[in-house]
Amino acid sequence: MNIGNQLKGWLGLALAFCTLGTLPIHAQVRLPNVFSDHMVLQQQQENKVWGRASANELITVTIADQKHSTTADANGDWHVKLQPLTAGGPHELTVSASNTIKIADVLVGEVWICSGQSNMQWNVQQSSDPDLEKLTAKFPNIRMINFPQVGSQEPIWEHPKSKWQVCSPESVLSFSAVGYSFARQLHLALDVPIGMINNAWGGSACEAWISRNTLQSAGGYDELLAHWDALAREADELSANENSQTDEVKKKRSGLQGRLLGNHRPGNIYNGVLKSHLGYGIRGAIWYQGESNASRAYQYRDLFPLMIASWRQEWGQGDFPFYWVQLADFKPESADPMESDWAELREAQTMTQDRLPKTGQAVIIDIGEGKDIHPQNKSDVGKRLARLALANDYSVDIAAQSPRFQSMEKQGNKIVLTFSHTSGGWRPFDVSEPVGFAIAGEDKKFVWATANVLSDHRIEVFHSQIPNPQAVRYGWADNPKCNMYSRAGLPLTPFRTDDW
């Protein structure tokens, strides 16, 4: 298929600020834009530096007291690995060949990816208290780089408009609000520079962040891939003899072309965005996505872990920490217990913790807004993610995980539930009685239940009209009414004991 030649208007826009991986090799040494002034290198580990030059050209890279040399291959590609550096700076990174590139104000500290869709992309200007955030954003050792939204089936090597920005009152409003809140907590707790690589794309689907080869090899995604292949063929067919087409056909063709270069097509963001900095030295990643996959929660059970595993494999840094935000409460509240796509997607996210090591979930079932898919309170989201990183990766003694359902036991007309991570007890919100529990009998019909706290880790649930209860659900709705927190102030993770 010849999609690249057919999508003239769209690719013209993309090429205005991107360089495709298939462009001819330039004689001068070049670096992708993740290596630029004000960058942050990951401390205490090797850091890969890569670029392009003339074939077989000698490249020399220096920083601090290190000097590394290598020779570009026949295609002009080259890389070196810097030896571990301690936190601090600033340093100058120099890359020399037939020309010399000097990168100034390089710090060494902790580097994290912040990724996902619009709720991660949402910037400080769009979130709560932007004026206060601007006033207090005096953290020159926090830096962030934003990557553009470019969909492609071919790898894009660099994004010339992407530059590292130093946190200041002038720059902070364009920072990812969740990413900035996360970075600020880490910086204040660890007292080291923090670098955030923001590649989030609003509305993106999980499959767009995974390479097509990975999806094909995993199996189970043939129908998904075939759907997009069919759209590509249709676009090719509509592009034939375009000069003789009606306005209606041209409009349809344009719509197809937009979708093919958009944020849902498998592999598009992997190639168009992620590939340009995949392999950069990082500590880990934070992720806020799932809204665009909410109607396919059972598929997400496998798709999301596949994405994480594929990133880890291709990054070449082992099982780096990967933490995500569970979907917030959204949409109108329901008067009675009901089925919910969003609840099922939250369940798929929770399951991922048990399938992959070094993962964690920030539960925000209390932060959402019923009428807005983009909650304004991004500060607390970042703080809950920071708790996970501080506890798991930096040995800070702090509560990090939300309480989770562990087991159930039937005791007469009651079900007794046991939970983990309660931080020594419960702290109900608003009213003293637990709210948000539903129970079902043999008819599998859920009704609101009475719940009582039995101990720091146990809650009993019952209903006077259900003598033989079978299952319990909590927070199981698009926008549930629920009020249970651990003593550390972290909300109970929504769950169900059934699989109906």
Image (spheres, rainbow, N blue to C red):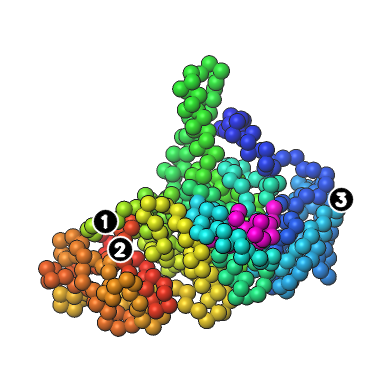
Quadrant hosting residue 138: bottom right
Q: Position of residue 225 (x, y in %)?
A: 47, 43
- Name the quadrant of the N terminus: top right
Q: Which residue is mark 1?
A: 334
In this picture, residue 102 sits left or right of residue 86: right
Residue type at mark 2 is Lys
Q: Earlier in the sequence, mark 3 or mark 1?
A: 3
Q: CA distance from mark 1 to mark 2?
A: 9 Å
Q: Position of residue 245 (x, y in %)?
A: 51, 18
Kind of element beneath mark 3: loop
Looking at the image, can residue 75 be seen?
yes
Q: Which residues are magenta?
A: 163-180
Magenta stretch contains residue 364: no
Q: CA distance from mark 3 to mark 1?
A: 65 Å
Quadrant hosting residue 165: bottom right
- Frontmost of labels 3 and 1 is 1
Residue positioned 41% across, 74% down in the render: 489
Quadrant hosting residue 354: bottom left
**Tag 3 and tag 2, C-beta contact below 8 Å:** no
Q: Which residue is mark 2?
A: 481
